[in-house]
Image: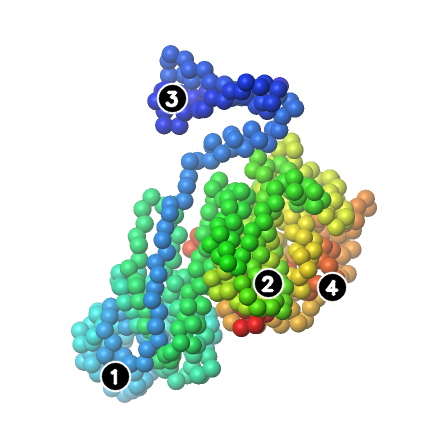
Amino acid sequence: MAVTLVTSLASSSSRFPFRSFSSSSPSSLSSCFVRFQLPSRLRLAFTVTPLYSSSRAMAHTIAQATLGLTHANSVDHPKISFSGKEIDVTEWKGDILAVGVTEKDMTKDANSKFENPILKKLDAHLGGLLADVSSEEDFSGKPGQSTVLRLPGLGSKRVGLIGLGKSASSPSAFQSLGEAVAAAAKASQASSVAVVLASSETVSNESKLSSASAIASGTVLGLFEDCRYKSESKKPSLKSVDIIGFGTGPELEKKLKYAEDVSYGVIFGKELVNSPANVLTPAVLAEEASKLASMYSDVMTANILNEEQCKELKMGSYLAVAAASANPPHFIHLVYKPSSGPVKTKLAIVGKGLTFDSGGYNIKTGPGCLIELMKFDMGGSAAVLGAAKAIGQIKPPGVEVHFIVAACENMISGTGMRPGDIITASNGKTIEVNNTDAEGRLTLADALVYACNQGVDKVVDLATLTGACIIALGTSMAAIYTSSDELAKEVIAASERSGEKLWRMPMEESYWEMMKSGVADMVNTGGRAGGSITAALFLKQFVDEKVEWMHIDMAGPVWNEKKKTATGFGVATLVEWVQNNSSS
């Protein structure tokens, strides 16, 4: 039997004492934990584990006892009231009047006075101070520039000028405006803000709704700060935002509500990625999914498969990755189905769910390996669950959506997958493992087979899959791979509405030669050349030919290195895509 000795210099009144377990039936006891309390401050404890017992069960108990005693603080995200208004900006009353200005709007005449009508009107009420201060601070309307001035003469306590660059026409530009508004509100502890464009006539009537929606989304996301793991945090005071000049009425209100719902889905995705691996285990990720099903029980159900159930489904590829970890795998399957009306389209969204990736025996080492950030290797699953949250709230009609995550950890132990092992996926295909750090595709293989078995029409998977994709496209956009031009058009159109950047990459079939094995159907990685492409070709082997499929490699944009935080990438695009496939 294996014996582990643990010593602890602690008094008997320790806040975290060891527990003793006993059983009247030794034959049924898989392990025994014994404590000796000595008279002095020295405590001895040891575990006795029979050779026939499950080492994973005891290892999991020990792992849970040494996870740093960290728990996320409970936080309530502030709710902001958004409304559209058509009023004279000089008459608006509140804390900050934020004016979005282009470089052209900042043009001044020979007397250093604004030519733009709105800025000219504001400046007149302020006795020329707005023009003077903007000149003194060298504010020219460039993107990223902003200045907030406390000036008497208006109903608002402060006036903010926010640079939009040459023009403002894209969703990302208006979202950036909202983020700048949120930053100004946080800095000034403002509770009420109004947003207006200096040249609102440049926004077409057709795009006013989407532009106002983007401003609202940017404000919610800009206000968010993940303080769950900090001992102290400040609550933002912003309560209301009036969007002036973009229309009014129920259609605008519906669009603003939609923006809020999507934004809180993005925030949920950010929180999942930000959570460290000692807190967000596969079991906790599954628990979060189950909570969503409970929250939206009128339209959503959850089925969480345990390890034995996955064995019954012959998910050898997924389970091989999970085999080394003390934390057992959890296969997550959420289903959204409208409470009424016919379903015209069935979709599946599959997310890579590695809550931590050590690399396995091909351990991540050296500069740039990013092992300290491998909590974000479940970024695909965060996008999936963030989208599920938003869709549960929005409730689009006529579309059924399956949200699928094969959650696990890629660790190192005597029970783990080794280089050279041959594993068998649930569709019967065999894989020679030539690199244990190419594990995400192994989990996705069984997840994709499972997704196709749900009778869906289209499947999109998202994964932080390859470093090669980061080398190719950088950190601001994700790569997409698909053989379906129609699906590519759908998802790219959704990304353009959401403001997230995608770039279609080639599915170069000739590269499959690099993925051939001498002893199995395929290897799991083809080397450095075209690494993101060969990864996509690998995944294609597990997709039913009758199903339209797209792979999104989001390794680059999952994380904002400058802000040291998750981005929530993918959520907004997925929601837009589902909406596009609905009856609404």
Relative to 388, is 161 above or below?
below
Question: Which residue carries the number 4 mark?
Answer: 546
Q: Specify which label sits upstream in the sequence, 2 or 4.
A: 2
The amino acid sitting under disc 2 is: Glu
- Of all residues, the one furthest to the right in this rendering is 518
Q: Nearer the viewer, mark 4 or mark 1?
A: 4
Secondary structure category for the residue under label 2:
strand
The amino acid sitting under disc 3 is: Ala
Picture quadrant of residue 114: bottom left
- CB within 8 Å, label 1 to label 3: no
Question: Which residue carries the number 3 mark?
Answer: 10
The amino acid sitting under disc 1 is: Lys
Q: Position of residue 518 (x, y in %)?
A: 82, 46
- Quadrant containing the N terminus is top right
Q: Nearer the viewer, mark 1 or mark 2?
A: 2
Secondary structure category for the residue under label 4:
loop
Determine which of the numbered discs, if any, sits on residue 400 in the image. 2
In three-dimensional space, the C-alpha distance between marks 2 and 3, rounded to whole angstroms, equals 56 Å
Secondary structure category for the residue under label 3:
loop
Q: Nearer the viewer, mark 2 or mark 4?
A: 2
Picture quadrant of residue 242: bottom left
In three-dimensional space, the C-alpha distance between marks 3 and 4, rounded to whole angstroms, equals 63 Å
- CB within 8 Å, label 4 to label 1: no
In three-dimensional space, the C-alpha distance between marks 2 and 4, rounded to whole angstroms, equals 18 Å
In-image side of 479 versus 43 (left or right): right
Give the class, few, some or many, for how many residues have Cα within 10 Å of label 4's Cα (few <14, many ≥20).
Answer: few
Q: Specify which label sits upstream in the sequence, 1 or 3.
A: 3
In three-dimensional space, the C-alpha distance between marks 4 and 1, rounded to whole angstroms, equals 61 Å
Determine which of the numbered discs, if any, sits on residue 121 in the image. 1
Q: Residue at x 20, y 72 (%)?
A: 151
Q: Is residue 328 visible?
A: yes
